Image (cartoon, grey):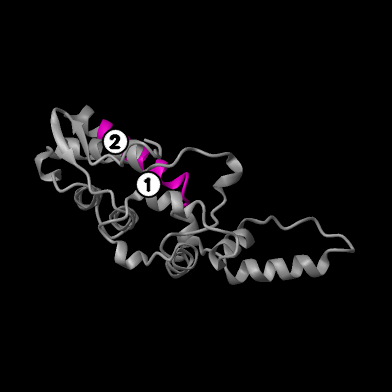
């Protein structure tokens, strides 16, 4: 489901003959992502808690269908379109960069994200997020993280030293990088994982 100026973000879906209400506010989607990467939870609890963030009707869905529903919601309503391979370099993290993202929204749009809980839809949030202007600190840091270090020559040694220093200052540590939470690719991988889990559970009966 893409962004539209004509249609309002979908508030319902039909799944296995049931009408399911959606609560795809940005804070709930981010909480869902936080739950899914919590290594202290088992897969069943992750699915149960994550789904509870995205719909108040999850209790109506049979346990064997919950993973399929979660995967469907990610695929149809949360995942961003796939980009080129070059875009797979982690250059931000919604959680580690929370303060920077908050400041960027306040500076660029005069939007206090804390006051938008339960109001700002995920599609609206991501549309604004992907269009943050270059004069925000967050954009500057993403640029530092994503800029490749050039091959050294006699003219650019100072530039390389400074770039490496900045990359070290703003690096996403292995915990964040390995969790694959980059905007375009991470959500797809999570959805694929739960789709495979659902298929395995269905095969087992």
Lateral position of residue 63 relative to residue 109, left or right: left
159 part of magenta stretch: no
Please rate how many residues cluster around mark 2, counting C-alpha atoms within 10 Å: few if below 14, some from 14 to 19, many from 20: some
Q: Main secondary structure of the magenta part?
A: helix
Reading the image, the residue beneath label 2 is 72
Which residue is drawn at the image coordinates 19% and 50% (left, top)?
Answer: 52
| Disc 1, SS | helix
Q: Position of residue 60 (x, y in %)?
A: 9, 40
Residue 51: x, y in percent?
22, 47
Q: In the image, which is nearer the foreground, mark 2 or mark 1?
A: 1
Region in magenta: 182-199
Residue lying furthest left:
60
User: Which mark identifies residue 138?
Assistant: none
- From the viewer's perspective, is residue 153 above or below residue 62? below
Q: Secondary structure at mark 2?
A: helix
Q: Is residue 90 visible?
A: yes
Horizontal relation, residue 37 to residue 154: left or right: left
Q: Can residue 180 be seen in the rendering of this structure?
A: no
Q: Residue furthest right?
A: 154
> Which quadrant is home to the N terminus?
top left
Q: Is residue 184 magenta?
A: yes
Q: Quadrant of the C terminus?
A: top left
For marks 2 and 1, the one nearer the N-term is: 2
Q: Viewed as shown, does residue 203 lie left or right of 163?
A: left
Q: Distance from label 2 to label 1 (Cα)?
A: 16 Å
158 sits to left or right of 8 = right
The residue identified by callout 1 is 123
* Percent coordinates x, y for residue 140 in the rendering: 60, 64
Vertically, is 65 above or below 175? above
* Front in this rendered view, residue 68 or 100: 100
């Amino acid at each position: 489901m893409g962004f539209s100026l004509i249609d309002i973000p979908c508030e319902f879906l039909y799944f296995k003959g049931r009408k399911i209400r959606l609560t795809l506010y940005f804070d709930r989607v981010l909480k869902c992502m936080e739950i899914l990467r919590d290594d202290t939870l088992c897969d069943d609890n992750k699915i149960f808690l994550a789904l509870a963030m995205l719909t108040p009707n999850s209790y109506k869905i049979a346990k064997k269908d919950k993973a399929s529903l979660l995967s469907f919601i990610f695929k149809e309503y949360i995942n961003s379109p796939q980009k080129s391979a070059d875009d797979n370099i982690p250059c931000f993290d919604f959680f580690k960069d929370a303060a920077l993202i908050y400041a960027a929204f306040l500076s660029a749009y005069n939007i206090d994200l804390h006051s938008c809980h339960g109001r700002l839809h995920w599609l609206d949030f991501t549309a604004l997020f992907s269009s943050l202007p270059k004069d925000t600190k967050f954009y500057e840091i993403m640029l530092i993280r994503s800029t490749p270090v050039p091959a050294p020559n006699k003219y650019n040694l100072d530039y390389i030293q400074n770039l490496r220093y900045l990359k070290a200052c703003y690096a996403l540590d292995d915990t964040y990088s390995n969790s694959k939470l980059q905007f375009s690719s991470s959500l797809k991988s999570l959805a694929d994982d739960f789709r495979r889990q659902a298929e395995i559970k269905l095969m087992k009966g």
